[in-house]
Image: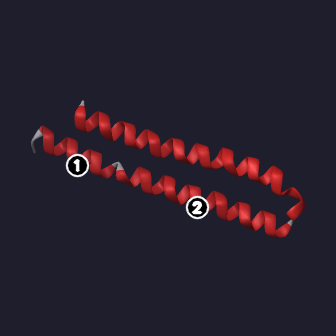
């Protein structure tokens, strides 16, 4: 296998990191909606936690994109 083909294959496989990030963000906000539905008084506290959780999940996706770009152009 050529080096370029291996780079492209690795970058393509890193798309799973982006899919995992999207699923993680969906789960975070799903849990937020369930928590607010059960106890509306805690919505502000839960929203802060949800934003932090979404940011951490998005960080994993951005790391996957960064590694993919390094593989392709590095």
In the image, residue 6 sits, relative to residue 46, either above or below, namely above
Report whether 10 appears left or right of 54. left
Among all residues in the image, which is located at the extreme left?
A: 2
Q: Residue at x 13, y 38 (%)?
A: 3
The disc label shown at residue 43, or none = none
Q: Quadrant of the C terminus?
A: top left
Q: Is 3 in front, or is 38?
A: 38
Q: Quadrant of the N terminus?
A: top left
Among all residues in the image, which is located at the extreme right?
A: 41
Q: Quadrant of residue 6?
A: top left
Q: Secondary structure at mark 1?
A: helix
Q: Residue 19: x, y in percent? A: 44, 57
Q: Residue 60: x, y in percent? A: 50, 43
Report whether 27 appears left or right of 9. right
**Tag nearer the camera, 2 or 1:** 2
Which residue was labeled with disc 1?
9
Q: Secondary structure at mark 2?
A: helix
In the image, residue 13 sits, relative to residue 70, either above or below, namely below
Q: Residue 59: x, y in percent? A: 52, 41
Q: Who comes first in sequence, dot 2 or dot 1? A: 1
Q: Residue at x 82, y 52 (%)?
A: 44
Q: Colour scheme used in the picture?
A: secondary structure
Are there few (<14), some (14-19), or many (20+) residues within 10 Å of tag 1?
some
Which residue was labeled with disc 2?
26
């Amino acid at each position: 296998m050529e080096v370029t083909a291996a780079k492209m294959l690795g970058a393509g496989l890193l798309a799973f990191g982006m899919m995992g990030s999207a699923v993680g963000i969906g789960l975070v906000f799903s849990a937020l909606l369930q928590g607010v539905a059960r106890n509306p008084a805690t919505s502000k506290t839960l929203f802060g936690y949800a934003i932090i959780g979404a940011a951490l999940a998005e960080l994993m996706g951005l790391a996957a994109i960064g590694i993919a770009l390094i593989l392709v152009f590095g």
